[in-house]
Amino acid sequence: MRISGVLAPSAGLAVRLTLGVAALLAVSQAAWAQAYPTRPITIVVPFTAGGPTDALVRTLSERMQHSLGQPLIVENVTGAAGTIGVGRVARAAPDGYTVSVGHWSTHVINGALYPLPFDLLKDLEPISLLTSYPMLLVTRNGVPAKNLTELTAWLKANQDKVSVGTIGVGSAAHVAAVYYEHLAGLKFQFVPYRGAAPALQDLMGGRIDLLFDHLPNALPQVRDGKVKAYAVTANTRSPTAPDIQTVDEAGLAGLYINIWYGLWVPKGTPAAVKAKLTAAVVEALADPKVRQQLTELGQVIPPRDQQTPEALAAYQKAEIEKWWPIVKAAGMQGE
């Protein structure tokens, strides 16, 4: 309401009240974020306890709680290849008390496999890249090839009868094998397994010919001479297995599959809260004891400049742009 072009007193009061409330809310939110955390933080692991993701989180959380001053509770929320656990965080209150940990499969590949009820890039905000490791290309000992070039030639000559293990549709083992097919002009007969352990067991028993396995999982069997290793799926050698060639060195440049881990929070989480979580991760990854433990798990810690939210956001987006077309072109669909 206006009187002679002047804002009426009641309207002016309403504007002042609105501005005052907004300012009060901003101050309250800033004070709340500064006090964070005041209670335990839940980290949702989208897989069963005892797996590599679980081991990574428990190693980091023990050190992070010293920085944050509150316990970090690991909650295993399983189902649908990790989508249930990730979705729980995407729908959680954006207050910093529910955090998502995941990796290349849960926060990249699943978006191409499933009609997700959340957006991996828009509904979650990055905290930090954690660690990574390459896949390892291994075969049964009876395969005659002495190197990757010879292996590719042998596979081409026998591809109508070669069997390749996968850990389910869209798993890293499956996507890596499909990518190998694409780059080398091969065609495989896939044998699905419910887990890496039975697939590796069948490889050792000679019941399948080839498998892309997680480096930490397959390396002990390579060291014991139970399977043959041809290359790591990276352009630099792994510090865990420095004697194994990269795919570039072995003769198939570009066959890169990097299993990386990250931490995310729900969209709308205050910047100050995210900064505290990132700082806690950075401090944990710099701790000599934590670094040694992670190295023993076969994990590679990224350089400091790659531990930022911005670096994780850019990396995740680039990985989605690379892998989604490959997964969709192969006709993969989540089970």
Image (cartoon, grey):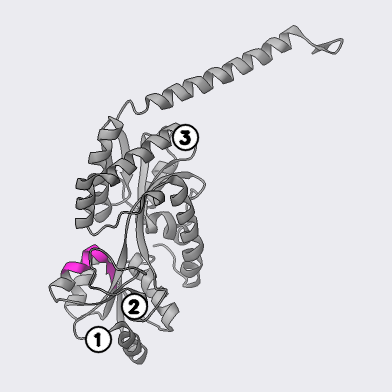
Residue 230 located left or right of residue 107: left
Query: Of the residues shown, which amino acid type is indicated by label 1?
Result: Lys
Q: Which residue occupies the foreground of this view, 303 or 65?
A: 303
**Residues packed near mark 3 inside 10 Å, few (<14), some (14 to 19) or many (20 plus):** few
Q: Are marks 1 and 2 in contact (CB under 8 Å)?
A: no
Mark 3 to mark 1: distance in Å?
53 Å
Residue ranking furthest to the left: 224
Tell whether position 328 is magenta.
no
Mark 1 to mark 2: distance in Å?
14 Å
Which residue is rendered at x = 29% and y = 57% of the image? Answer: 300
> To which residue does mark 1 refer?
146
The mark total stands at 3
> First in sequence: mark 3 or mark 2?
2
Q: Are marks 3 and 2 in contact (CB under 8 Å)?
A: no
Residue 206 located left or right of residue 85: left
Which residue is rendered at x = 15% and y = 76% of the image? Answer: 226
Query: Of the residues shown, which amino acid type is indicated by label 3?
Result: Ala
> To which residue does mark 2 refer?
249
The quarter holding residue 173 reads: bottom left
Q: Which residue occupies the foreground of this view, 222 or 50?
A: 222
Q: Which element is circle 3 on?
A: helix
The quarter holding residue 272 reads: top left
Residue ranking furthest to the right: 4
Query: Of the residues shown, which amino acid type is indicated by label 2?
Result: Glu
Q: Which residues are magenta?
A: 212-220
